[in-house]
Image: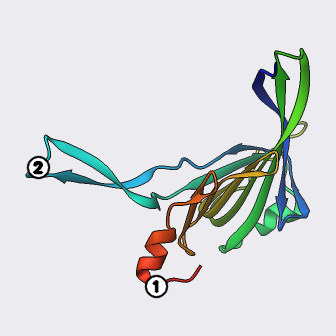
Amino acid sequence: MSNPVPEKIINCRVYLDNEVLIGFADAQLPSLEAMTDTIKGAGIAGEVESPSIGHYKPMTVTLNFRSVTDSFAGLAAQKAHSLDIRGAMQVYDAGAGSYKIESVKVMLKAITKKIDLGKLNAGEAQENSFEGEVVYLKLLIDAKEKIEIDKYNFISKVDGVDQLAEVRSALGINA
């Protein structure tokens, strides 16, 4: 009997426009925090923080690199950058007693908010970083789409269910 235990990300790389290697980075991925409004009044016993379906507060990604590259320098342009963060996840199958590798891919469009060029010290990593406002996010695990959020195109999918399909229809948006 299979008993998969996802253990860790073995390693990851960051690509620009799906093909240009920017470098190796630690990534602080965005938090998905729903936009909410407090609902209260007659018929409700108290208050409820009600989410606006498919709407999220600002999402930020931070990438911490060891050294600057030509491609990293281009991230200073204040525009949306198409970033792919590709990871290899180690999964232990406790039933079979063996390991397997699953791919984890996070595709982002992020508008530059901050570039830190790091430091220049002999024999040390430069420790430069990129911080961007995420306007598009797609998470794939073993090539299966798990989450897709596209703020400007009114798309919010979780496990294949588009939470904004009825909203787009009500607004007359064809997406």
| Relative vertical location of residue 155 with respect to residue 128 in this rendering, above or below | below
User: In this figure, which residue is indicated by the disc labeled 2?
Assistant: 43
Q: Secondary structure at mark 1?
A: loop
Q: Depth check: 134 or 66 in front?
A: 134
**Coloured how?**
rainbow
- Residue 46, how many percent across, how many down? 14, 41
User: In this figure, which residue is indicated by the disc labeled 1?
Assistant: 172
Q: Is residue 154 visible?
A: yes
Residue 155 shown left or right of residue 146 in the figure:
left
Residue 40 shown left or right of residue 87 in the figure:
left
**Residue drawn where x is 71% and y is 49% of the image:** 63
Name which residue type carries label 2: Gly
Dot 2 or dot 1: first in sequence order is 2
- Residue 3, how many percent across, how many down? 77, 20
Q: Quadrant of the C terminus?
A: bottom right
Q: Depth check: 3 or 138 in front?
A: 3
Q: Secondary structure at mark 2?
A: loop
**Residue drawn where x is 46% and y is 85% of the image:** 172
- Residue 147, how many percent across, how many down? 64, 53
Mark 1 burial class by Cα count in 10 Å: few <14, some 14-19, many 20+: few
State the separation of the CA atoms marked 2 and 1.
32 Å
